[in-house]
């Protein structure tokens, strides 16, 4: 099993024109756990995720992975150890599912038998039917497309997995099924996972640690139980209250003594 990385963000700032998208962000992402970034639209959570994958360069501050700075020169090599699922999957419509999944493996000219074995492993892991590998994205259901996107992100066995609103475009029943599957996959793989969502119930269900953001800043971090029992300020309290119904459903499903409440 590959070792998951420890990630540390120090005083990260990012501006887009006159908008300060990230402000003095300090964050430690623990190895082998699922950290969920949550907050209202425009709070900076997706921007923060994009800085981790190197798609955005911070204007100030630094990111360190296992103690080594993530410099622009190191990003290209480091990116191979990062799996990234973008919003709505981002599959190439002119490629079938199999070609979407193994695109990087083919680019790196990995042995065909190893690629075949890895694709079979990922189908088993994600519950994707092998018979669907020849289908194109428009021929797949929304849930199947998301499974293909996840398999593509996992193809090179990355030690860091980043997911940006991976379930946001799905209907509630498919989303519920994929939430259960994702939680099981995270538990099986023991990778460092950072996931963005706007849904508090989903964050509580999937996350070991919650990072609540507002206007480019981190407002509170910790297990969901801490946000519920000891909100840092009125914003945290109001954000939780605004999503009370899905959160109550989560608590009823898991019970007050569930692992996400500790």
Image (tube, helix red, strand yellow):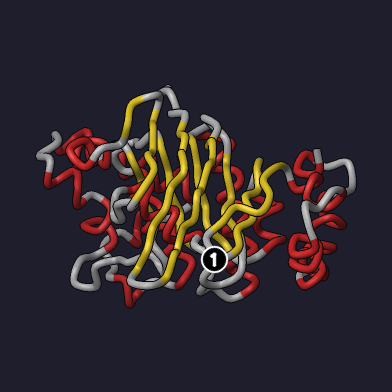
Q: Which residue occupies the foreground of this view, 134 or 126?
A: 126
In the displayed structure, 7 sits above or below 83; it is above
Give the percent coordinates (x, y) of residue 207: 64, 46
Give the percent coordinates (x, y) of residue 256: 89, 47
Quarter where residue 110 is shown: top left
At 37% from the left and 58% from the top, the residue drawn is: 149
Give the percent coordinates (x, y) of residue 221: 67, 45
Q: Looking at the image, how many numbered discs can be counted on the residues?
A: 1
Evaluate whether residue 218 shows in this view.
Answer: yes
At 35% from the left and 62% from the top, the residue drawn is: 132
- Pointer 1 residue: 43
Give the percent coordinates (x, y) of residue 2: 40, 24
Quarter where residue 139 is shown: bottom left
Furthest toward the right, the residue is 256
Quadrant of the image containing the N terminus = top left
Per the image, label 1 sits on a secondary structure element best described as: loop
In the displayed structure, 164 sits above or below 138; it is above
Q: Which residue occupies the foreground of this view, 54 or 183?
A: 54
At 81% from the left and 46% from the top, the residue drawn is: 225
Image position of 163 (left or right of 217): left
Quadrant of the image containing the C terminus = top right
Image position of 207 (left or right of 7): right
In the displayed structure, 138 sits above or below 227; it is below
In the displayed structure, 34 sits above or below 39; it is above
Evaluate whether residue 145 shows in this view.
Answer: no
């Amino acid at each position: 099993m590959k070792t998951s990385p420890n990630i540390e963000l120090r005083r990260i700032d990012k501006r887009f024109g006159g908008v300060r998208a990230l402000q003095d962000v300090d964050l430690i992402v623990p190895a082998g756990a699922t950290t969920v970034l949550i907050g209202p639209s425009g709070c900076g959570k997706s921007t923060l995720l994009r800085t981790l994958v190197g798609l955005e360069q911070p204007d100030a501050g630094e990111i360190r992975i296992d103690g080594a700075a993530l410099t622009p020169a190191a990003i290209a090599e480091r990116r191979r150890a990062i799996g990234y699922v973008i919003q709505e999957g981002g599959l190439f419509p002119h490629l079938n599912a199999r070609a979407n999944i193994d695109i990087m493996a083919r680019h790196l000219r990995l042995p065909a038998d190893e690629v075949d074995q890895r694709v079979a492993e990922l189908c088993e892991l994600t519950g994707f039917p092998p018979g669907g590998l020849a289908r194109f994205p428009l021929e797949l259901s929304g849930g199947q497309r998301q499974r293909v996107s996840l398999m593509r992100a996992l193809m090179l066995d990355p030690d860091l997995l980043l997911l940006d609103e991976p379930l946001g475009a799905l209907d509630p029943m498919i989303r519920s099924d994929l939430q259960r599957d994702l939680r099981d996959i995270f538990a099986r793989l023991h990778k460092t996972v950072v996931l963005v969502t706007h849904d508090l119930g989903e964050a509580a269900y999937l996350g070991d640690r919650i990072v609540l953001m507002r206007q480019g800043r981190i407002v509170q971090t910790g297990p969901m139980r801490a946000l519920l029992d000891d909100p840092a300020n009125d914003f945290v309290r109001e954000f939780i209250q605004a999503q009370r119904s899905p959160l109550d459903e989560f608590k009823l499903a898991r019970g007050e003594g569930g692992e996400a409440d500790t």
